[in-house]
Image (cartoon, rainbow, N blue to C red):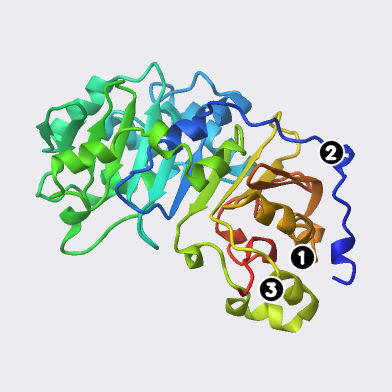
């Protein structure tokens, strides 16, 4: 740690830099579903279309033989680091029960609207997908249809067997006497390819559910989380942390006890500014190519991003992380601070996305 601030920032020549941000990406399409009426805590995202193509399975769908689907998802599971489950535990029965499985998706996003809980899932299906089969499954399980600008399906009060629970798109099983309360309200966009699944919303007003089920790209374009997500470009997987209650995602140094034994790092962390949102993601140009990770911090002022640049980029590859990632590039872009890293051994499962970053010094905020 003695030379932590000596890390050079002009290191673009040490490795490839991720592509410049595009005007429209699958991640931006997904994050446009921010509900303007709630406070967003975070978003988990997976680009299934890109992953399938990367692993030679672009044409595989739920209509493909089970062995092909299993082989594809197992290959992805071994090679990638995802923020959402693959659905392997129900792959053999999911399509028969609900009219789709993971191989039918183009992308998937899970929104967290309350700390420690889920608010909704947004599923974008491929052009091949048969919406009528999904509607048929909803009818078969007792869902009630409520037509409108956004088509709603209200869950039945009777219990559906837990092993085929629709809410298990995130891999979790709900148990208990009030199991039916967690059944999801399903909203289908007029495009017939986007399904929004609302948890704990059985008795919410239809107008409110429809509003929360539509994309709001124009209304949320200036949201710090959207600015951070835009800088990720085309990630295979990403997580976005965003809340005005910064303690939910921007750990303070006094909460990380292990910094007590490292006063030098603690002193650097103490001087960091608080950011408004953070996005983490990774990509790779080919299945066997090294992963490339990106961390984006969105601030309310350009000055804060510039002041944090040197310290955060140095902390990003210091300590234990120095043995697993190397720095590719670090820079500011308007009010965003962007740090690109590459796993030394190439595999993305070194804390490029997901909860492993929660207490890393470079994502902390100062004591002020």
The residue singled out by tag 3 in the image is 270
Q: Quadrant of the N terminus?
A: bottom right
- The residue that disc 1 covers is 320
Residue under numbered circle 2: 15
Quadrant of res 72? top right
Q: Determine the residue located farthest toward the bottom in the rendered image.
A: 260
How far is the residue under mark 1 from the one under mark 2?
Answer: 21 Å
Q: As rendered, which of 249 and 169 lies closer to the eye?
A: 249
Q: Could you tell me which secondary element the residue under label 2 belongs to?
A: loop
The numbered mark at residue 163 is none
Rendered residue at 57%/31% (across/down): 51
Image quadrant assignment for residue 213: top left
Looking at the image, tell me whether mark 3 or mark 2 is earlier in sequence order: 2
Disc 3 is placed on an element classified as helix
Q: Position of residue 105 (x, y in %)?
A: 42, 29
Q: Residue at x 30, y 37 (%)?
A: 196
The crowd level at tag 2 (other Cα within 10 Å; few <14, some 14-19, many 20+) is some
Q: Residue at x 48, y 22 (%)?
A: 60
Camera-side mark, 3 or 2 = 3
Q: 10 Å neighbourhood of mark 1: few (<14), some, or many (≥20)?
A: few
């Amino acid at each position: 740690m003695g030379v932590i601030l000596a890390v050079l920032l002009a290191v673009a020549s040490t490795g490839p830099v991720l592509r410049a941000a595009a005007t429209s990406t699958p991640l931006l399409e997904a994050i446009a579903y921010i509900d303007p009426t709630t406070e967003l805590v975070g978003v988990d995202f997976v680009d299934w279309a890109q992953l399938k193509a990367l692993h030679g399975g672009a044409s595989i769908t739920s209509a493909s033989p089970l062995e092909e689907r299993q082989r594809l998802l197992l290959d992805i599971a071994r090679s990638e680091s995802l923020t959402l489950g693959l659905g392997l535990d129900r792959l053999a029965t999911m399509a028969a029960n609900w009219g789709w499985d993971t191989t039918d998706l183009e992308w998937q996003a899970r929104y967290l609207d309350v700390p420690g809980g889920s608010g909704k899932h947004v599923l974008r299906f491929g052009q091949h997908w048969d919406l009528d089969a999904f509607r048929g499954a909803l009818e078969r399980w007792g869902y009630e249809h409520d037509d409108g600008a956004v088509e709603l399906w209200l869950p039945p009060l009777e219990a559906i067997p837990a092993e085929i629970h629709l809410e298990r798109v995130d891999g979790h099983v709900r148990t208990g006497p009030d199991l039916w309360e967690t059944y999801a309200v399903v909203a289908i966009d007029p495009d017939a390819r986007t399904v929004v699944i609302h948890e704990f919303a059985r008795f919410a007003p239809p107008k409110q559910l429809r509003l929360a089920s539509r994309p709001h790209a124009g209304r949320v374009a200036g949201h710090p989380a959207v600015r951070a997500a835009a800088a990720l470009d085309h990630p295979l997987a990403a997580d976005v942390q965003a809340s005005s209650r910064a303690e939910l995602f921007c750990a303070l140094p006094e909460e990380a006890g292990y910094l007590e034994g490292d006063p030098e790092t603690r002193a650097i962390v103490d001087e960091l500014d608080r950011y408004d949102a953070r996005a983490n993601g990774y990509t790779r140009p080919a299945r066997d190519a090294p992963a490339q990770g990106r961390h984006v911090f969105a601030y309310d002022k350009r000055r804060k991003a510039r002041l944090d640049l040197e310290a955060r980029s140095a902390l990003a590859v210091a300590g234990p992380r120095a043995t697993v990632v190397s720095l590719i590039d670090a820079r500011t872009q308007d009010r965003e601070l962007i740090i690109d890293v590459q796993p030394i051994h190439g595999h993305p499962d070194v804390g490029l996305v997901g909860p492993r970053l929660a207490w890393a010094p470079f994502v902390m905020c100062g004591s002020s």
